């Protein structure tokens, strides 16, 4: 399972992840929604998840993009792509504007 898959599973399960400010601590809540399999996957990717959460927090705080991943997330949101191969308003050769 990739870190992206883990974060998707966390979101789908209705969990929130919180990284410690100074230590390599990662909390998941509400704990009752955390399955043993998901807990193991989070533990496996803990360092990378903490890094991603830190990048996202820094971007929220400063407005400055911190990673390539954030660029792609912003592009997906802007072009209304779902990241799973779904349709958007834009297609090659298509000149219609959003909402038009």
Image: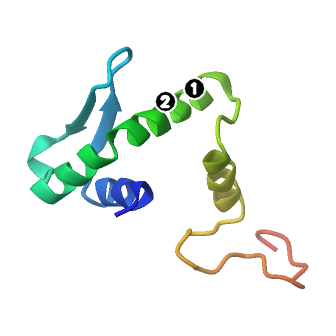
When asked about the image quadrant of residue 30, the answer is top left
Where residue 23 appears, as percent x and y from the top left, is 32, 18
- Dot 2, crowdedness within 10 Å: few (<14), some or many (≥20)? some
Q: Is residue 18 above or below residue 75?
A: above
Q: CA distance from mark 1 to mark 2?
A: 6 Å
- For the point 56% across and 69% down, the residue is 82
Horizontally, is 68 left or right of 83 in the view?
right
Name the residue furthest top: 22
Where residue 3 appears, as percent x and y from the top left, is 40, 54
- Dot 1, crowdedness within 10 Å: few (<14), some or many (≥20)? some
Which labelled disc corresponds to residue 54?
A: 2
- For the point 24% across and 44% down, the residue is 43
Where residue 40 appears, as percent x and y from the top left, is 19, 51
Horizontally, is 38 left or right of 49 in the view?
left
Image quadrant containing the C terminus = bottom right
Q: Which residue is mark 1?
A: 58
Image quadrant containing the N terminus = bottom left
Residue 72 visible? The answer is yes
Which labelled disc corresponds to residue 16?
A: none
Asked whether the beta carbons under mark 1 and mark 2 sit within 8 Å of each other, the answer is: yes
């Amino acid at each position: 399972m990739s870190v992206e898959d883990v974060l998707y599973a966390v979101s789908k399960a209705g969990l929130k992840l919180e990284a410690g400010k100074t230590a390599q601590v990662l909390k998941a809540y509400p704990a009752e929604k955390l399955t043993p399999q998901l807990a193991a996957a989070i533990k496996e990717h803990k360092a990378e998840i903490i890094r991603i959460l830190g990048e996202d927090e820094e971007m929220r705080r400063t407005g400055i993009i911190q990673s390539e991943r954030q660029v792609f997330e912003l592009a997906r949101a802007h072009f209304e792509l779902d990241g799973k191969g779904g349709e958007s308003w834009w297609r090659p050769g298509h000149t219609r504007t959003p909402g038009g």
